[in-house]
Amino acid sequence: MNDVVITVRGEHETRVAPERAIAHLTIKAEGPERGAVVERMAALTEPVRDDLASRKSAGTVVEWTSQRVSVWSERPWNNEGKRLAPVHYASVDFSATFTDFAVLSWWAGDVAEREGVQLGWIEWQLTPETRAITERDVATEAVGVAVTRATAYANALRLENVTPLEIADVGLLSRQDRPESGPAPRALMAKASFAADAGSGPAVQLQPEDIVVSAAVEARFSAR
């Protein structure tokens, strides 16, 4: 009996509690005079900047960033369809990374009450080290699922010897009718496609859902 080629897909996912939270906020000022608006923006921004700098020095904030001030003007329309005098705006965006969610909760409640501050959303993350380890483990499990499926198919056909030919990211597996370079099986490629769903929500969402880390692979085996 000729070898039977079996093509399968393997998936696996796991859930991990977030380790970091990135808070995004915007400070905005507006008024009829451009210069006064910029000055007001600076006055509103300074205490937030100083607070984040002191928290980073104390170790309660891992890092923080702020973007350049954006300044623009608009001429609104009144109810009669006439253009009014220009209104000037200025805004700056901040982000701050916390590891202590209790500290974040207190800080978010405090900063949200300040004039001109709009707390946007909280972005929940894993540390790079945890993510790398988790992705590796999930990829390993996904490959194991593919092997188990291929073995089950082979057993259903009363075949016992299952040999891996190819394994790759979803969508990267070579077509069945593509000519091979030789009769020998291809080397195993340890690759997987990853997806993370880091739960984030509107305004001060301080009860994060677990982060989902998933992997999916496509694999081809020969069985005899």
Image (cartoon, rainbow, N blue to C red):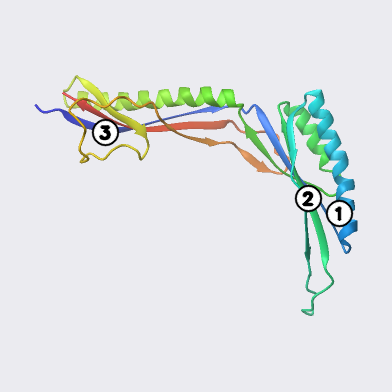
Callout 1: 10 Å neighbours few (<14), some, many (20+)?
A: many
Q: Where is mark 2, residue-wise?
A: 69
Callout 2: 10 Å neighbours few (<14), some, many (20+)?
A: some
Q: Where is mark 1, residue-wise?
A: 38
Disc 1 to disc 3, how far (Cα)?
62 Å
Q: Which amino acid, by three-letter code, is at mark 1?
A: Val
The image's mark for residue 51 is none
The quadrant holding residue 100 is top right
Secondary structure under tag 3 reads strand
> 71 above or below 126?
below
Q: Residue at x 84, y 71 (%)?
A: 85
Disc 2 to disc 1, how far (Cα)?
9 Å
The quadrant holding residue 164 is top left
The image's mark for residue 7 is 3
Foreground tag (2 vs 3): 2
Residue 122: x and y, percent? 69, 39
Callout 3: 10 Å neighbours few (<14), some, many (20+)?
A: many
Secondary structure under tag 1 reads helix
Residue 191: x and y, percent? 40, 29
Q: Is residue 27 left or right of residue 5?
A: right
Q: Residue at x 35, y 38 (%)?
A: 172
Disc 2 to disc 3, how far (Cα)?
54 Å
> 144 above or below 116?
above
Q: Which amino acid, by three-letter code, is at mark 3?
A: Thr
Q: Of label 1 and label 3, which has the lower sequence position?
A: 3
Q: Which amino acid, by three-letter code, is at mark 2?
A: Val
